[in-house]
């Protein structure tokens, strides 16, 4: 499923912070977790994750440290900071409001989908013109 | 190297192909300036994890690599995101001492080498300062100081390049001999430097001319060292032209900064009643001037492949303005008062104007890609050269009349000679540029003409230094 770019961008920060709130992680593992959480329906462009992680690091919401992976390669690990947890809580409140509002809209839509003038299409639009 | 044993048994025995592909990809990412080396490392780790996972799922090396790269996304977009996050990375920063820990590909040797180079350079700068200080203490005569200073300072700059380029001893000896011979000539000539008893005595013309022209000869000798002896190469000559332009820009900036510091020190010290001037003249200037030259040369060398050249940029900015100026001059010369009263100052001014035009032309050419088709800027240069030639033609006619009337002096001949040399240089350059914009000539011809003609200036300067004083009776 294709998800709108802006929506991906808006949800990326709380998702990453939320995943890191569970414990420290690194780039590839974070992406795998996102895929898992969305049941494979949310596919990010992998490369875009890294500028985002840098931005969160600059805002001191997460901290990075270099470690060594099992394979012997150097790997950058990220952990959430107290400021990051605060930001996550704030984001959570915001998303709850948005989600509640949207839920009501979806509800209204499915209630009156047939007779609603605004969704009837070009025929009514002609009548207004 | 990172393959776990199970991979080597499950898939192809070695992953040389995959490694080569990853190497290629890494090279591709590294070229993005916004993505720093540690970021590339992080992304490569990601790519390898992804490939390993895909291989687990049954894909072979090639397929896994392709899918992993595709998922990584368009590098342009990723690079733009990095640039938004790290806008400072888009400003090329001059790293004088590469830091090994950032892993920019430069090893510890480079940093150490840079430090050693700076050490050699500073030692040479101090030596040049001592030489200049000895000269200043040994004589009070300004003309002697000005005449000899380039001979004492430039060899140290040449020494730096000789050391850096490992110049063959024979070439170095020949150049030293040439410079030494010239130094002997100018110091043995019985110049008229004015009556030492008379504080307002005017120095003779020929010594002033020698003071002005000897550095040009020496500068071309330094160029031979700069080109590591292969001074016949057009490319090396153009490199030296570029070096000279950048050096002038850096020197100007260093001089501005230095003046600011000296001014501030002067102001504060004068408030508490300390006279800064003796120290300034006796110690600071003899060491600061050669020091500034050497440090500027070192900076130009260090930054040449890192930071954009500024001289060509300035040339581009000023070419249209200079063209306007020349057109205005041309109109003024034609409509203004009678030219029969003009003095040799007009000739000297004209030389300066032509030199400016030449610099604009030379530095625009130095930065141009020879394979680019002719564009609007080439036309603009043609206008510039044409206007310069027209202005000079008017001025020259007037001057020739004057000289025919009042006879030759050393100054007039020197100014006239330089004018003619510049005229030939620009006229032929204009002809070649015209051919280029019309499509009958290549740009390389224009470029080659510039570099081939440069020794003429050295030869003329040598004539002025060596032949003029006896010809005009050392007056």
Image: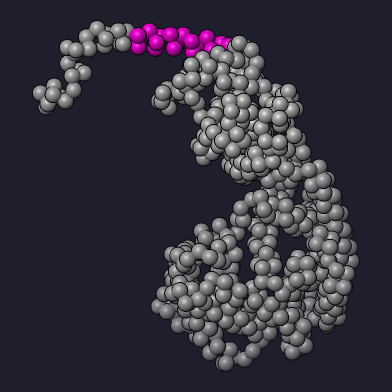
Q: Which of A112 and B133 is in front in this view?
A: A112
Is residue A88 shown above or below B292?
above
Question: From where the camera sits, is residue A110 visible?
Answer: yes
Image quadrant for the N terminus of chain B? top right
Please indicate whether residue B274 sits to the left or right of residue B409 in the image: right
Whether A13 is drawn above or below B58: the answer is: above
Q: In which quadrant of the rendered view does residue B200 lie?
A: bottom right
Magenta-colored span:
A85-103
In the rendered structure, does residue A83 fall within the stretch colored magenta? no
Q: Position of residue B131 (x, y in %)?
A: 87, 62
Q: Residue B265: give x, y in percent of width and height.
A: 74, 45
Label total for image: 0
Residue visible at 53% across and 31% down in the picture: B71
Instruction: Point out residue B60 in the picture as x, y percentages from the top left corner.
Output: 60, 34
Residue at 84% over, 63% down: B166
Name the residue at 64% across, 33% down: B44
The residue furthest left is: A127
Side (left or right) of B444 relative to B212: left
Q: How is the image coloured?
A: one colour
Give the camera-side residue of B373 and B214. Answer: B373
**Frontmost residue, A128 versus B284:** A128
Q: Would you say the magenta stretch is mainly helix, strand or loop?
A: helix
Can you say which quadrant of the picture contains the C terminus of chain B? bottom right
Residue at 68% over, 49% down: B257
Answer whether residue B415 is visible to the viewer in this image: no
Within the image, what quadrant is residue B417 found in?
bottom right
**Residue A102 on the magenta span:** yes
Q: Is residue B144 above or below residue B320?
A: below
């Amino acid at each position: 499923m294709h998800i709108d770019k802006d929506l991906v961008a808006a949800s990326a920060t709380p998702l990453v912070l939320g995943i890191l709130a569970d414990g420290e992680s690194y780039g590839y593992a974070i992406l795998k977790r996102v895929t898992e959480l969305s049941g494979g329906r949310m596919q990010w462009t992998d490369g875009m994750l890294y500028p985002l992680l840098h931005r969160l690091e600059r805002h001191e919401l997460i901290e990075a440290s270099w470690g060594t992976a099992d394979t012997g390669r150097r790997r950058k690990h990220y952990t959430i900071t107290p400021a990051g947890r605060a930001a996550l809580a704030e984001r959570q409140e915001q998303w709850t409001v948005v989600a509640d509002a949207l839920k009501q809209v979806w509800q209204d839509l499915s209630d009156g989908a047939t007779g609603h003038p605004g969704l009837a299409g070009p025929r009514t639009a002609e009548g207004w013109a | 190297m990172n393959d776990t044993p199970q991979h080597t048994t499950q898939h192809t025995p070695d992953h040389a192909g995959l490694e080569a592909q990853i190497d290629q990809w890494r090279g591709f990412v590294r070229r993005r300036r916004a993505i720093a080396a540690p970021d590339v490392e992080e992304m490569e780790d990601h790519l390898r994890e992804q490939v390993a996972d895909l291989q687990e799922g049954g894909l072979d090396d090639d397929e896994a690599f392709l899918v992993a790269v595709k998922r990584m996304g368009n590098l342009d977009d990723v690079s733009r995101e990095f640039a938004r996050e790290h806008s400072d990375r888009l400003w090329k920063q001059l790293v004088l001492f590469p830091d090994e820990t950032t892993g920019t590909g430069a090893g510890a040797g480079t940093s150490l080498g840079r430090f050693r180079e700076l050490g050699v350079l500073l030692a040479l700068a101090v030596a040049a300062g001592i030489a200049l200080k000895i000269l200043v203490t040994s004589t009070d005569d300004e003309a002697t100081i000005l005449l000899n200073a380039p001979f004492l300072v430039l060899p140290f700059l040449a020494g730096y390049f000789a050391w850096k380029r490992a110049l063959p001893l024979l070439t170095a000896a020949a150049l030293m001999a040439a410079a030494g011979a010239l130094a002997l000539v100018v110091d043995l000539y019985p110049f008229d430097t004015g009556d030492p008893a008379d504080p307002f005595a005017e120095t003779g013309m020929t010594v002033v001319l020698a003071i002005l022209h000897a550095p040009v000869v020496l500068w071309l000798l330094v160029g031979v060292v700069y080109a590591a002896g292969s001074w016949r190469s057009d490319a090396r000559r153009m490199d030296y032209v570029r070096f000279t332009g950048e050096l002038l820009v850096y020197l100007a900036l260093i001089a501005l900064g230095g003046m600011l510091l000296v001014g501030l020190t002067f102001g504060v010290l004068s408030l508490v009643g300390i006279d800064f001037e003796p120290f300034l003249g006796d110690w600071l200037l003899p060491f600061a001037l050669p020091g500034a030259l050497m440090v500027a040369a070192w900076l130009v060398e260090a930054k040449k492949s890192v930071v954009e050249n500024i001289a060509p940029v300035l040339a581009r900015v000023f070419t249209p303005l200079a063209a306007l100026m020349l057109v205005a001059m041309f109109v003024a010369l034609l409509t203004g008062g009678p030219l029969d009263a003009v003095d040799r100052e007009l000739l000297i001014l004209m030389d300066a104007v032509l030199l400016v035009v030449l610099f604009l032309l030379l530095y625009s050419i130095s930065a141009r890609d020879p394979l680019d088709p002719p564009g609007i800027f080439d036309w603009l240069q043609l206008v510039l050269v044409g206007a310069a030639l027209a202005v000079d033609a008017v001025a020259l006619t007037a001057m020739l009349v004057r000289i025919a009337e009042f006879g030759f002096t050393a100054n007039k001949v020197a100014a006239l000679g330089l004018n003619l040399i510049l005229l030939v240089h620009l006229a032929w350059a204009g002809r070649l540029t015209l051919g280029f914009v019309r499509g009958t000539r290549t740009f390389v011809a224009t470029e080659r003409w510039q570099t081939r003609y440069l020794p003429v200036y050295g030869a003329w300067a040598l004539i002025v230094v060596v032949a003029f004083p006896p010809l005009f009776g050392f007056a």
